[in-house]
Image (spheres, helix red, strand yellow):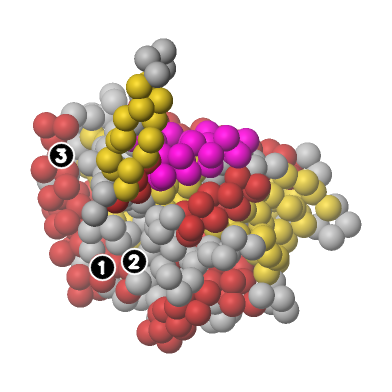
Amino acid sequence: MTISRRKILSGLGITTTILLSPLQLFATSLKEKIETFRDTLNGKLITRNDKNYELTRLSSVWQQVKPKQFPDCIVQAKNVDDVVAAVNFARTNHKQISIRCGGHSYYSSFLQNDKLMLDVSSLREVSIDTGKRQARVQVAMRSVDFMAEIAKHGFSFPAAHCGNVPLGGFLLGGGAGWNGEAWGGMSCFNISEVEVVTAQGQLIRANAEQNSDYYWAARGARPNFFGVVTEFVLDLYAEPKVILTTTLIWEVSRAKDVADWLEAHIRSMPENVEALFILTQNPDPKHEAGEERVCIVQVSAFSDTEAEARQALAPLSSSAMTDDCLAKTEYASTPIASLYEWDAMAYPQWRWDVDHLWSDDSAGDVVEKVIQHTRDMPSTRSSILLLLKPHTKELPDAAFSMIGSLYIACYAIWGSPDEDIPNNNWVKKTMTLLKENTKGHYVNESNYADNPERARGSFSAESLQKLKRLSSKHDPEHLFHSYL
């Protein structure tokens, strides 16, 4: 079947008939719709036919590994109206949506073939209500900027350890943030309300009493959320007047003993103490002959007075275990800004592969399994990190429903594409070595893009079923890409 269109050839007065197939007519119609949609936006629409498409696609990824995934078009929303318009356009034209906030998904889950990629990275407004001790903040505000802004009013928050990470994906996935044990356990439990664009293109507010399905899911669903969160209302904390950090370094051969020692001490230390255990390359370029791999203990106390912080950290200094340290720095003043500087220096924007697990096993047993694996690490910038969470409490009812007393993450960081295979294999072997210790996964740092069991293992069985049910209820046409 064909459909005719009459046309007068300019300047010749000749009438001709052009026959269009249904496919051609559809393509013409879609192109017109795209151009009409482009004209309605305050932000930008980039299609695969645009010259800047590939540059935009590549630059959307935070790290140097760029997946070969190609969205049909990219909407760079300038404001919430653009988000609503993009959702309505996608629904009307049967295009599934993937969402990019800051591009820090290690596996670039927002890059999906044939989808409309909705980029909300321009949504960065914030306002502080000092009376209510709350912040109203849009999703793409970076953690480091948010912390600096609320500090002007005497507040703090368990924001992401990496300052460049925006609040959006971090909070939607749970959020393991600064001083997390004392400030809500996981950062998402400090969300009081969210603003959401639904699959039907409606702008709603959701909290414990209103649109509670969205509120429940916004605290932990991450890539499986059935809407677009554009703004959070967050409960804030009094800014710690003093943050002191003790850093201790041993050769990796001592790692199991050190892990056992640290875990025994941290259980009796207050909630406002955060303890990291890191297996990595010796950071001292002038270190004497010996093992190049080390274990680093970094413990910070978030306190109101220096005396209180020193008292919290004192058990580490008084122990004989520290007598054979390679290096020791005690009670160093480390305001949030300097902690962010350390993190940025330790974790450059090179090529990355990451995976993660929760465990309830002892730190020493876990560490013992990966000591030789640390020695075999192909890149000197890589690490295995343990965050000890001895004060983990029963979780509130929310999508975030999987946690352990140990947060274990493997970070491979390297510079050249020629080194991809050995570094990727090193990460996979880490997860294999610790398979028996695995209780579940943390959706923000697990490779759920390539491993569906990571997405399932990031939720309790009950929460996973509820999330699937709510997704079908509120997004029956599966407008939003998910891993359910």
Residue position for label 2: 483
Does residue 154 show up? no
Residue range highlighted in magenta? 29-48
> Left or right of 324: which side holds 433?
left
Q: CA distance from mark 1 to mark 3?
A: 22 Å
Whether 299 is drawn above or below 102: the answer is below
> Left or right of 279: which side holds 297?
right
Residue 41 falls inside the magenta stretch = yes
Crowd rating for badge 3 (residues with CA inside 10 Å; few <14, some 14–19, many 20+): some
* Residue type, label 1: Pro
Main secondary-structure element of the magenta-colored stretch: helix
Whether 302 is drawn above or below 433: the answer is above
Q: How many marks?
A: 3
Q: CA distance from mark 3 to mark 2?
A: 25 Å
Q: Position of residue 39 (x, y in %)?
A: 57, 35
Q: Quadrant of the C terminus?
A: bottom left
Q: Mark 3 or 2 closer to N-term?
A: 3
Dot 3 falls on a residue whose secondary structure is helix
Is mark 1 in CB contact (under 8 Å) with mark 2?
yes
* Residue type, label 3: Asp
Crowd rating for badge 2 (residues with CA inside 10 Å; few <14, some 14–19, many 20+): some
